[in-house]
Image (spheres, rainbow, N blue to C red):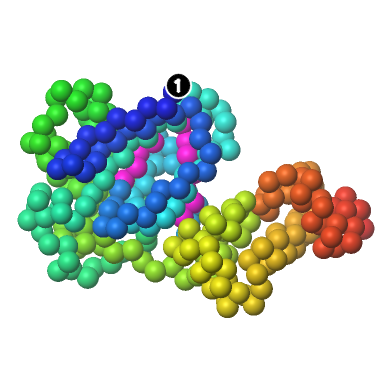
């Protein structure tokens, strides 16, 4: 399977997209102002790392997301991805909502308590996904009337699944991201193998601003704090589990056992294996 992208646009903006690929590394979904999206997985499995959640998506689970930075990450389940990964996305915009329903989302302050949410794919959503897949494969069938009909259908299905009080309130909430506390983002992603730059992206800060903010909050540089916390967690796992040292290194966010061993020796004055024996 080679990388393949198919899109359907409405008024020069992507509304439906299908992505097919054999494999991928961690990929950033950039913040786009006034954009919300819904993602189905048609084939394979993918993980999603957000500022405060870590989700696994497959054929049974989809995702609804507001406008924020988050990462797509490859699944550890290699068997589920042996035939590649295929996803179908639906994008929504305030201008589109106004065009479809004559609703002005700026008139509602309704909020939902999530920025990203996992959604079970029921029979109705599954049928909708398949209908969009057919359109993406047969663009000659598509016109503005069909696009508007399918978008209205999708919005009604999602609103029903989320028990929202009204169309206006739910759609307004999709374009109002909740602020995530800086400290919570760090704690949630403490043992991920994220770079400083990637962590900064999750907090929506530049790398330099992130480092300043981090030192204000934790009284320590990001690098020193994160390595120390990973090593402390590793030490606990060495005492409480029988997992291999290389597995523990990976579990706490080190990319290689050699880097882990070197840092562990420097911090504790002995190797991980000697620490475990003692």
Tag 1's secondary structure?
Answer: loop
Question: Magenta span has 261?
Answer: no
Rendered-image quadrant of the N terminus: top left
Q: Is residue 85 above or below residue 169?
A: above
Q: Residue at x 77, y 45 (%)?
A: 257
Left or right of 158: which side holds 253?
Answer: right
Q: Position of residue 56 (x, y in %)?
A: 48, 44
Q: Which residues are magenta?
A: 38-50
Q: Count every numbered label the image shows and give the total.
A: 1
Whether 46 is among the magenta residues is yes
Say which quadrant the C terminus sits in: bottom right
The residue drawn where x is 29% and y is 36% is: 17
Q: Position of residue 103 (x, y in %)?
A: 10, 59
Q: Residue at x 15, y 50 (%)?
A: 96
Residue located at (31% from left, 40% from top): 89
Image coordinates for residue 139, horizontal then vertical, percent? 19, 25
Query: Can you see residue 126?
Result: no
| Relative height, residue 1 to residue 184 (above, below) | above
The residue wearing badge 1 is 1
């Amino acid at each position: 399977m080679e990388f393949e992208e198919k899109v359907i646009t409405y008024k020069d903006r992507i509304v439906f997209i299908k992505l097919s690929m054999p494999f991928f590394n961690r990929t950033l979904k950039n913040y786009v102002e006034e954009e919300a999206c819904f993602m189905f997985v048609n084939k394979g499995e993918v993980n999603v790392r957000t500022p405060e959640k870590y989700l696994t998506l497959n054929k049974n689970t989809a995702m609804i997301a507001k406008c924020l930075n988050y990462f797509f990450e490859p699944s550890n389940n290699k068997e589920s991805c042996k035939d590649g990964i295929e996803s179908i996305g639906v994008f929504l915009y305030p201008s589109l909502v106004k065009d479809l329903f004559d609703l002005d989302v700026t008139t509602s302050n309704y909020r939902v308590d999530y920025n990203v949410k996992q959604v079970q794919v029921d029979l109705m959503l599954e049928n909708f996904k398949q209908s969009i897949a057919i359109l993406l494969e047969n663009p000659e069938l598509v016109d503005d009337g069909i696009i508007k009909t399918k978008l209205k259908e999708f919005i009604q299905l999602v609103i029903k699944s989320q028990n929202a009080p009204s169309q206006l309130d739910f759609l307004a909430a999709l374009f109002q991201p909740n602020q995530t506390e800086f400290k919570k983002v760090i704690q949630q992603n403490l043992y991920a193998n994220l770079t400083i730059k990637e962590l900064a992206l999750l907090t929506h800060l530049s790398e330099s601003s992130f480092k300043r903010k981090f030192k204000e909050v934790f009284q320590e540089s990001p690098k020193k704090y994160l390595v120390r916390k990973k090593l402390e967690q590793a030490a606990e796992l060495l005492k409480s589990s029988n997992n291999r040292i290389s597995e523990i290194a990976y579990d706490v966010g080190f990319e290689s056992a050699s880097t882990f061993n070197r840092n562990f020796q420097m911090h504790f004055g002995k190797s991980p294996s000697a620490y475990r024996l003692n």
